[in-house]
Every structure is written in C-alpha cells, then in structure tokens.
Image (cartoon, rainbow, N blue to C red):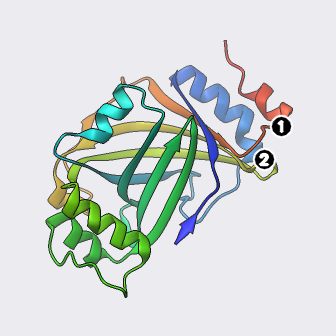
Amino acid sequence: MVGKEYRKELKYVINQNDKLILEERLKTLVEKDKHTKEDGTYTIISLYFDDYNETNYYQVINGISERWKWRIRYYNYNSSYICLEKKYKHNGLNKKYQIKLTKKQAEDIISLKNIQISKDNPKLLNEFYLNIFNKILRPKIIIIYDRIPFVYKAGNVRITIDYNLAFSNEFDNFFNKRIKLIPVLEPNQAILEIKYDNFIPDFIRYKLELN
C-alpha cells in the first residue's frame, strides 16, 4: 500500500485562453510520467463510490473539512494498471492511500461479487470491503477527463490542466472506451489543479499568475 504525506491541493476553473497561456509558460517544466502519451497528456477514468445517503457528496457540498472518498482509477483505457484509492482530506490538506487491483478484482467490486475480507488481502482492500458491508458503499459515478501534467521536484509540485471533463453512470462499461459520456464543463472550460507539499518555488508561482 502506498500512502503519501499530507499535501495541499488548489483547484480553479479556467477558460481556454488561460489554458493556452499556462501550457506555453509551463511546458519547460514537463516531465513525462508512466501514464503520459506521446502528446504529453493522458486520460483518467475514475469510478467513485458513496453510501446510500450520499454522505461523501454532501460533505463536499457543505464544505466539511474532514472527509474521505473511495475510487477505482485507471489510465488511457489501459486496464493493465488499475488502482483502488482512498483519499482523505483534513483542513485543506490531502493524503492518498493506494493499492493495485486486477481487472477481475475491479469488475467483481463493481458487480458486488466475491467481496470477501481475508487476512491475505491488503489492509486497504479489507477496509474498503468493510465499507461496502457496513456503510453500503456502491458505485455512484464515473468521471473521465484528459490531463496535461507539469511537475517540478522541489516542493513536490504537480500542476495539471484537466479538460474534456465528462461523467457516466454506465458502470458495466467502465472498461469500455465506447462508454456513453455526458459533458460536465462548458466547451471552453478546464480545471487547473495545483498540488505541493510545503512550498511552491516563486518562479513557478509567478508563471501561474493570470488576470
């Protein structure tokens, strides 16, 4: 299980002009990661879970400072790398725990089959299964978008621009590229996300300044 220390996360809605300006300013900071395609982007496919009362959803809407969420995520419609993630937020800081899943494990979770707590399971998987049983966690929404990543090692800074954001409730098609999608943002909108540990170098901060 991979667990990261608390990080700061900031998110902003930007327009197409802002997106182009930031791409030009930040392109020298790019480091391709294992998920990035040749064009410097990758597609993220995530399935989020919530309980019968939609507790996670209302925690976000009501601005609750301490909350968590569960999701299954993979990239570029390539099911060779799938992960189960628990994301915990406390007073504006975020921490993420993650384990790898097989495609069959993910499909079983989505269809609620073969859900068994076992000493042979990773701790995080057993915790997730307990939530399925005790809190009646169920698949709630699929979110899909394209991402442009920019990274800088000092401060563990990661800046991303997410666009083509869409959702679906076709849970049986989670691993199908032909899944039916409904757009979330306006055509000219994108999401700027800034993550860092303790600081952002000033020269990067200046590059992020917009009107």
Residue ID for mark 2 = 155
* Image location of residue 159, percent across then percent down: 64, 41
Residue drawn at x 43%, y 60% is 85
**Vertical arrangement, residue 116 with respect to residue 57, above or below:** below
**Label 2 Cα neighbours within 10 Å, binned few <14 / some 14-19 / many ≥20:** some
Residue drawn at x 60%, y 47% is 149
Give the Cα distance between marks 2 and 1. 7 Å
Q: Secondary structure at mark 1?
A: loop
In the picture as drawn, the residue positioned furthest to the top comes out as: 211
State the residue in front, 166 or 46.
46
| 158 lies left or right of 192 | right
Screen quadrant of the C terminus? top right
Residue ID for mark 1 = 201
**Label 1 Cα neighbours within 10 Å, binned few <14 / some 14-19 / many ≥20:** few
Of the numbered discs 2 and 1, the one sitting upstream in the chain is: 2
* Image location of residue 1, percent across then percent down: 52, 72
**Vertical arrangement, residue 12 with respect to residue 130, above or below:** above
| 187 lies left or right of 174 | right
Residue drawn at x 65%, y 58% is 32
* Image location of residue 2, percent across then percent down: 56, 68
Q: Secondary structure at mark 2?
A: helix
Q: Report the amino acid beneath label 1.
A: Pro
State the residue in front, 59 or 147.
59
| 122 lies left or right of 172 | right
In the picture as drawn, the residue positioned furthest to the front comes out as: 134
